[in-house]
Amino acid sequence: MTRKNQAGFTLIEVMFASVASMAILAPAIAVMFKSFDWYAEIQSAIALNREARQAMDVIGNGARLSVNGHDGKPDLYGIRGRNSPPGGPLRTNYVLQYQSNGLTVNGDSIASLTITCSAANQPLPDCPSKDNKRTVSGWIGDDASLSNSRSAASRTVEVTVTITDPFQAQRAVNAGSATQSYRTSFTLNRDVSDP
């Protein structure tokens, strides 16, 4: 019986094909896993921009609610509809909380999650030091800053809002990519006292 007509691969050929396949597949798999990180970062950036637009819209333009405020209107006045900038913090438990005309509106909130600080200002902008824990229910990473120190005739207010993606902050390799600060100026347009 001769084995010359037997078809198949030798062990050496199979080993060579396996090594060649791994040399091709290893970089492809690495790129695939890196693309998951890129996707998470891009999705986080989109979420940060969306939350910043919503926060700036409420702070600048206010909102209309279903109940009446001090002046008998359902208007919660943003900076553009006020005589003076609002006082006090604009967030509670990382959720935007804006008050005007005796009314309050809250920004987007999430189910509470606990984030452990890895260092001062990491991964949240208001982390005091390592191993402190923060319970987060929203997107406002640090309290909004309102300033009219560079105001034109005391009629403009510079607003800085720091938005943090709490989901990305706790899992990102670079926690700084989960936080972004947004700045704009609004004009105080009300000539009479605020209600």
Image (cartoon, rainbow, N blue to C red):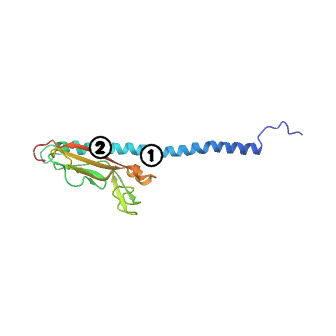
Residue type, label 2: Gln
Write the residue at 79% across / 37% down.
7
- Image quadrant where one finds the N terminus: top right
Q: In this rendering, does residue 62 appear at all?
A: no
Disc 1 secondary structure class: helix
Q: Residues within 10 Å of mark 2 (few under 14, many from 20)?
A: some
Residue 134: percent from the left, percent from the top? 35, 59
Q: Mark 1 or mark 2: which comes first in sequence?
A: 1
Q: In this rendering, does residue 57 appear at all?
A: yes
Disc 2 secondary structure class: helix
Of 22 and 147, the residue lying toward us: 147
Q: Are marks 1 and 2 in contact (CB under 8 Å)?
A: no
Q: Which residue is mark 2?
A: 54
Residue 123: percent from the left, percent from the top? 39, 55
Residue 102: mark in rendering = none
Residue type, label 1: Ala
Q: From the viewer's perspective, is 170 left or right of 109?
A: right
Of 24 and 47, the residue lying toward us: 24
Write the residue at 61% across / 43% down.
25
Write the residue at 66% across / 42% down.
21
Residue furthest toward the right? 1
Q: Which residue is mark 1?
A: 40
Residue furthest toward the left? 192
Give the CA distance from mark 1 to mark 2. Answer: 21 Å
Q: From the viewer's perspective, is 23 left or right of 160?
A: right
Residue 42: percent from the left, percent from the top? 42, 43
Write the residue at 26% across / 42% down.
57
Of 111 and 144, the residue lying toward us: 144
Residue 19: percent from the left, percent from the top? 68, 45
Of 153 and 90, the residue lying toward us: 153
Residue furthest toward the top? 5
Q: From the viewer's perspective, is 68 left or right of 133?
A: left
